Image (tube, rainbow, N blue to C red):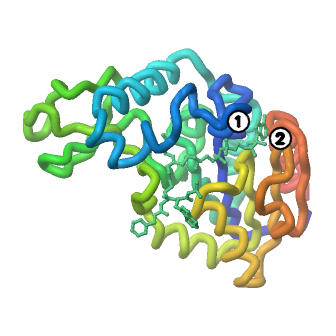
Amino acid sequence: MAKYRSIVILTGAGISAESGIPTFRGADGLWEGHRVEDVATPEAYVRDPELVHHFYNMRRAALGTVAPNPAHAALARLEQAFDGRFLIITQNVDDLHERAGSKNVLHMHGELRKAWCLGCDNRTAWLEDMTEESRCPHCSREGRLRPDIVWFGEMPYEMDRIDEALSGCDLFVSIGTSGNVYPAAGFVAMVRHMGRAHTLELNLDPSEGSRMFHETRHGPASQLVPEFVDEVLGG
Ligand code: BV8
């Protein structure tokens, strides 16, 4: 593969699937038994905070039972060996990229292991269950903590930094995402519009946006990503 100077990687739930974390669009369209609008919107949190806390508590606790897979490890190896600019933009709220050794990771949809206090607006690491009785470590208010997660209808994090990275990259790789959720699903079109970068999709199946990519490869991430990294580093 050509010599690249600036690589942006977008990851979605599919890169964590082989680690045992369920993807969102399971067969029945439910998300671990819940409709998205019942657990991943600000309205759901106001309507039924106990259900929303339970949904995220289960997923946060599950992080202790999973580990990074070869796809996460390969991206960490690429970042380590690559001498240009490198950024992982992840839609995932798990910590598997970091646990694999990746450093420059941008969680555009937030993180399971963080809490956001609506009383003092501070964010803090949060590893245990969160309930309506949980107290903010900064302001000690009770019942004002929510998962630091970007829900549907909320603005994803660090969009300016994302726009800057997409504008400047010469290789954009999308891994394990169905291309259903915006604005992430629109990143490939933004990069193509800039006209500078090669765009590659690595996914189990063709995504909603497959036709936007110069190149698509279909198969499990644990196989495709290490192969891709070997090509870039070998090239
Ligand atoms: C916003 C945190 C605006 C929650 C998440 C029409 C146009 C544009 C936008 C919209 C629109 N209609 C509605 C919207 C808004 C909405 C949206 O896009 N809705 C969709 C459903 C149409 N978007 C939003 O609300 C976003 N915010 O637009 O704000 C705004 C403007 C001004 C002011 C305020 C606001 C916010 C979206 C973020 C929602 N939060 N996550 C949580 O995790 O609990 S999204 C959540 O779902 C994930 O983070 C992820 O982003 C998404 C799931 O997508 P994927 O990661 O792709 O996962 P999926 O299961 O779908 O696919 C997995 C893929 O992996 C599959 O393709 C599969 O083939 C592949 N795969 C499986 N196994 C493997 C594999 N690949 C490789 N190897 C394997 N082994």
Q: Residue at x 44, y 26 (%)?
A: 60
Q: Is residue 183 left or right of residue 53?
A: right
Q: Please give the name of the residue rendered at 41% of the width and 62% of the height, measured from the top-left corner.
A: 155
Reading the image, the residue beneath label 2 is 226
* Residue 82 higher or lower than 24, as above or below: below
Q: Residue 51, position in %: x, y?
A: 36, 28
Q: Which residue is mark 1?
A: 73
Q: Residues within 10 Å of mark 1 (few under 14, many from 20)?
A: many
Element at label 1: helix
The N terminus: image quadrant: bottom right
Q: Amino acid at mark 1?
A: Ala
Specify whether 141 is left or right of 160.
left
Q: Residues within 10 Å of mark 2 (few under 14, many from 20)?
A: some
x and y percentages locating residue 27 in the rendered image: 73, 32
Instruction: Give the spatial CA distance, label 2 vs label 1.
Output: 8 Å
Quadrant location of residue 184? bottom right
| Secondary structure found at label 2 | helix
Ligand 1 within 8 A of label 1's CB? no
| Res 81 visible | no
Q: Between disc 2 and disc 1, whose residue precedes? A: 1
Q: Quadrant of residue 96?
A: top right
At label 2, the amino acid type is Pro
Q: Are marks 2 and 1 in contact (CB under 8 Å)?
A: yes
Residue 224 vertical position relative to residue 153 in the rendered view, above or below: above
The residue sitting at 68% across, 72% down in the picture is: 169
